[in-house]
Image (cartoon, helix red, strand yellow):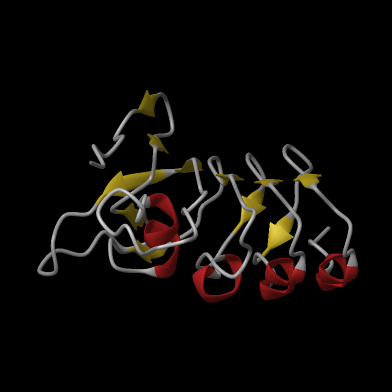
Amino acid sequence: GTIPSELGRLSFLRTLYLGRNNLVGTIPTELGMIKPIASISLQYNQLTGVIPESSLHRIPTLRFLQLEGNPLNGKIEMDGPLCQMRVDKTKNDETSEQKRVLRVLSATCVPSVGDDESLGDMLECDCCTRCFAKEKEVDHSPAFS
């Protein structure tokens, strides 16, 4: 089956674990409407398309986003919304009141290879805490200071 967009109406949901359910289709943007959610685990399904960064980054409490084992594509860039959730802005900006909370961002991905090269159907990630390959996990934890 697919992930129902109606999940976005569950205003008290704290954890969404749908891993290993043979889900197909795309990740619905409506998941970004679940404001108190702390963990979204969609790993090891057959989800395709791009990660809906523009909606997921609006979840101020999101600490874990686990997407490995899905043939997603596109690019998660360092200056993009999800990577900005990984950066602790309070360390360099004392006027910032809100600390970014995304602690784990994992996917089946490769580190970015630059603007000139294309990897086709692979997901490129500048800030994933872990990139999983088909056979093994590759740790690409960025050193945020």
- The tally of labels here is 0
Location of the C terminus (image quadrant)? top left
Direction from residue 36 to residue 67 in the image, left or right? left
Front residue of this view, candidates 6 and 135: 6
The quarter of the picture where residue 119 lies is bottom left
Farthest top residue in view:
136
Q: Position of residue 18 (x, y in %)?
A: 77, 44
Q: Position of residue 80 (x, y in %)?
A: 36, 69
The quarter of the picture where residue 48 lies is bottom right
Q: Is residue 8 above or below residue 144?
A: below
Residue at 33% x, 53% y is: 125
Direction from residue 17 to residue 27 in the image, left or right? left
Location of the N terminus (image quadrant)? bottom right
Front residue of this view, candidates 28 and 1: 28
Q: Is residue 15 above or below residue 83?
A: above
Farthest left residue in view:
116
Residue at 30% x, 46% y is: 110
Front residue of this view, candidates 43 and 93: 93
Residue at 26% x, 39% y is: 142
Q: Position of residue 85 (x, y in %)?
A: 45, 57
Residue at 35% x, 64% y is: 95
Direction from residue 54 to residue 144 in the image, left or right? left
